[in-house]
């Protein structure tokens, strides 16, 4: 499943931190985390932020962790901030997705301008 959200006037760094905390609350661990800052070409006093987070869950007793969710965040403080969440439905349950959406809506709902949910089938990796 893929969730896409667009927010207006939300600090991308705050959104990055909140998504990290909300997903960790669902029993995951962080795989990778990266937050980068870029100057805007037409206004060198403003910045664009780009963040990515991956989260993992343990798939069985004594087995390795697998990625269950990947978040991409791009935006500016005074403009739009876009979030794309790629969710593995088999590893991150619908109940956890619903709880994550509820948390995001409670904190950022009044800033949200658009949401798109796309469902797709994951291909299994024989490992």
Image (cartoon, rainbow, N blue to C red):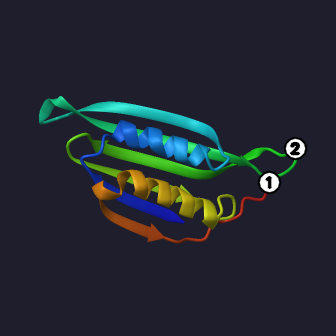
Residue 109, can we see it?
yes
Local packing at callout 1 (Cα closer than 10 Å; few below 14, some 14-19, many 20+) is few
Quadrant including the C terminus: bottom right
Looking at this view, is 101 or 48 the one in front? 101
Q: For the residues marked 1 and 2, what is the alpha-carbon distance in whole angstroms? A: 15 Å
Q: Which residue is mark 1?
A: 127
Looking at this view, is 107 or 64 the one in front? 107
Compared with 56, 114 (above or below) is: below
Considering every residue shown, the one lying at the far right of the view is 61
Residue at screen point 42% across, 33% down:
35
Q: Give the structural element (helix, strand or loop) at label 1.
A: loop
Local packing at callout 2 (Cα closer than 10 Å; few below 14, some 14-19, many 20+) is few
Looking at this view, is 61 or 25 the one in front? 25
Residue at screen point 31% across, 64% down:
114
Q: Earlier in the sequence, mark 1 or mark 2?
A: 2
- Kindly identify which numbered label has been placed on residue 1: none
| Residue 7 in the image, given as x and y percentages of width and height | 30, 54
- Kindly identify which numbered label has been placed on residue 62: 2
């Amino acid at each position: 499943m893929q969730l896409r959200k667009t927010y207006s006037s939300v600090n991308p760094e705050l959104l990055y931190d909140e998504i990290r905390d909300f997903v960790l609350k669902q029993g995951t661990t962080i795989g990778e985390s990266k937050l980068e800052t870029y100057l805007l070409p037409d206004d060198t006093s403003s910045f664009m932020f780009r963040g990515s987070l991956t989260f993992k869950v343990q798939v069985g007793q004594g087995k390795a962790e697998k990625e269950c969710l990947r978040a991409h965040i791009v935006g500016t403080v005074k403009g739009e901030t876009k979030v794309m969440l790629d969710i593995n439905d088999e590893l991150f349950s619908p109940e956890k997705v619903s709880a994550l959406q509820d948390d995001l809506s409670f904190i950022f709902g009044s800033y949200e301008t658009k949401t798109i949910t796309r469902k797709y089938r994951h291909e299994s990796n024989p490992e």
